[in-house]
Image (spheres, rainbow, N blue to C red):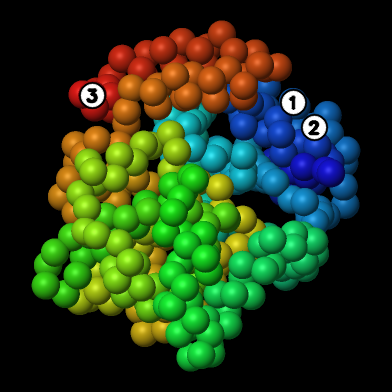
C-alpha cells in the first residue's frame, strides 16, 4: 500500500510539482529540517506536470519561496499532544515564514490549486470504498439519520452495539456539550475515523445523554496523547466547533455541516487548548505525565532518518516551558 505525498514549489512565476509514492511517511520529519533542506528534498522527488492525487493520499506541502508561505497537511499526526508539539517545532524551524495547515484539507487545497477538491473526492471515494469497515459504519449512520425506524433501533440497542461508542477501547474524540440550561457535559467518542458519530447529527447528543451519566473531565481521565479529535457543542446557540489532528480527506469532518442543518459548524484550529478555552478551563488536566513519554516516542520516530540536531534542541527547550508541564497525578 502506498502513502502518497505531493509537493509544490513556487518561485517567481515558476510553479513546479513533485510526487513521491511513499512520501507521506517522511513528510513530517522532512519539514522539521527547515526550509532550505526541505526544498532540496522536494526537488529530488519525481517531477510531475501537475498536482498529483492518488487513492492513498497522505500528505502535501506547498512552498512559496517568494512570499515565504508554507501550507502543509499530513494525516500522520495522530496524537493531539504530538500535533501541538509538531506545530510549535515547525514554527521554530521555519522562522519568518507564514505557516498554515488545514483540518478540512480538500477545501484548503482547492483555494490554492483550483480543481483540487474534485480530484480529492475522486481519490478518496476509491479509498473509502476499499475500506469495508468504514463503509459499514458510515452506512449505519446514514440510515440512522434518514430512517426513523433505524434510529429507533440504535436507541434500543444503544451506541455500544450500533456505533461502538458506549464502551470504548480508544477515546479518540473528546466531546464537550453546553446544554440549554448552561450545564456542561464532557464525554468521549470512540469511532474510527474520529468524529464519525457526529455525522449522525444533533440527535446523537440526546442518545449519549440517555445512556451515560454526567461526568467531569477529571472523572473521564482523558489524555492529550490519546485524543485525535474534539468537538464543542453549544446547544442554545446551535453552534458546533470541531478539530482533528489527522482529518481524512473527504472524511467525517467534511460532512458535519450537512449533518447539522441549521447549525453553525466551524473548525477549531487551536485543538484541545482552544476547546478548553471555549468553556473557560485553561488548566484542565489533559496533559498527563505519561503523555510526555509518548510524545518523546513520537518525536524520535519522526526524526529518525532526518537531520535532528537543531530540532532536538528546540524540542527539549519547549518541554521546559509552562505549556508542557503535566497535570499533578
Q: Secondary structure at mark 1?
A: helix
Q: Which residue is mark 1?
A: 40
Q: Quadrant of the N terminus?
A: top right
CA–CA distance in space, label 3 to label 1: 45 Å
Q: Residue drawn at (54%, 25%), measured in percent from left and top?
A: 298
Q: Quadrant of the C terminus?
A: top left
In depth, the one of 300 and 224 nearer the eye is: 224
Residue 98 can be seen, yes or no? no
Compared across the picture, whether 201 is left or right of 47 comes to left
Residue bearing the label numbered 2: 43
Q: Position of residue 146 (x, y in %)?
A: 53, 88
The residue located at (21%, 65%) in the rendering is 178
User: Residue 8 occupies which quadrant of the picture?
Assistant: top right
Which comes before the other along the chain, label 3 or label 2?
Answer: 2
Disc 3 versus disc 2: distance between alpha carbons? 48 Å
Kindly state the secondary structure of the residue where label 2 is placed. helix
Q: Which mark is residue 329?
A: 3
Q: Residue at x 46, y 50 (%)?
A: 168
Q: Residue furthest front?
A: 157
Disc 1 to disc 2: CB gap under 8 Å: yes
Q: Residue at x 54, y 40 (%)?
A: 78
- In the picture, measured across the screen, residue 312 lies left or right of residue 221, that is right
Q: Quadrant of residue 65?
A: top right
Q: Tell which circle, 3 or 1, labels the residue nearer the N-terminal end.
A: 1
Q: Nearer the viewer, residue 64 or 131?
A: 131
In the rendered view, does 210 fall on the left or right side of 79?
left
Q: What is the spatial separation of the Cα atoms under label 1 and label 2, in whole angstroms? A: 5 Å
Amino acid at each position: 500500500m502506498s502513502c502518497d505525498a505531493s509537493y509544490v514549489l513556487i518561485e517567481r512565476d515558476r510553479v513546479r510539482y513533485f510526487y513521491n509514492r511513499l512520501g507521506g511517511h517522511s513528510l513530517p520529519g522532512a519539514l522539521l529540517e527547515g526550509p532550505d533542506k526541505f526544498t532540496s528534498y522536494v526537488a529530488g522527488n519525481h517531477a510531475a506536470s501537475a498536482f498529483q492525487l492518488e487513492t492513498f493520499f497522505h500528505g502535501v506541502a506547498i512552498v512559496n519561496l517568494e512570499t515565504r508561505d508554507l501550507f502543509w497537511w499530513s494525516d500522520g499526526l495522530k496524537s493531539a499532544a504530538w500535533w501541538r508539539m509538531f506545530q510549535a517545532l515547525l514554527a521554530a524551524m521555519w522562522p519568518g515564514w507564514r505557516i498554515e495547515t488545514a483540518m478540512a484539507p480538500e477545501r484548503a487545497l482547492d483555494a490554492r490549486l483550483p480543481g483540487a477538491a474534485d480530484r480529492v473526492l475522486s481519490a478518496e471515494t476509491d479509498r473509502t470504498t476499499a475500506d469495508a469497515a468504514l463503509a459499514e459504519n458510515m452506512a449505519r449512520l446514514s440510515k440512522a439519520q434518514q430512517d426513523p425506524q433505524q434510529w429507533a433501533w440504535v436507541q434500543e440497542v444503544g451506541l455500544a452495539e450500533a456505533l461502538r461508542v458506549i464502551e470504548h477501547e480508544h477515546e479518540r474524540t473528546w466531546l464537550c456539550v453546553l446544554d440549554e440550561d448552561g450545564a456542561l457535559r464532557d464525554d468521549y467518542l470512540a469511532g474510527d475515523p474520529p468524529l464519525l458519530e457526529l455525522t449522525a447529527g444533533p440527535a446523537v447528543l440526546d442518545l449519549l445523554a440517555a445512556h451515560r451519566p454526567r461526568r467531569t473531565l477529571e472523572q473521564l481521565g482523558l489524555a492529550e496523547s490519546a485524543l485525535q479529535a474534539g468537538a464543542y457543542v453549544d446547544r442554545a446557540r446551535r453552534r458546533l466547533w470541531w478539530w482533528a489532528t489527522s482529518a481524512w480527506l473527504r472524511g467525517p469532518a467534511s460532512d458535519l455541516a450537512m449533518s447539522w442543518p441549521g447549525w453553525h459548524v466551524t473548525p477549531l484550529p487551536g485543538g484541545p487548548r482552544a476547546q478548553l478555552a471555549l468553556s473557560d478551563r485553561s488548566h484542565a488536566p489533559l496533559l498527563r505525565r505519561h503523555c510526555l513519554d509518548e510524545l518523546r516516542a513520537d518525536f524520535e520516530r519522526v526524526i529518525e532518518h532526518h537531520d535532528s540536531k537543531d530540532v532536538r534542541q528546540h524540542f527539549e527547550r519547549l518541554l521546559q516551558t509552562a505549556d508542557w508541564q503535566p497535570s499533578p497525578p
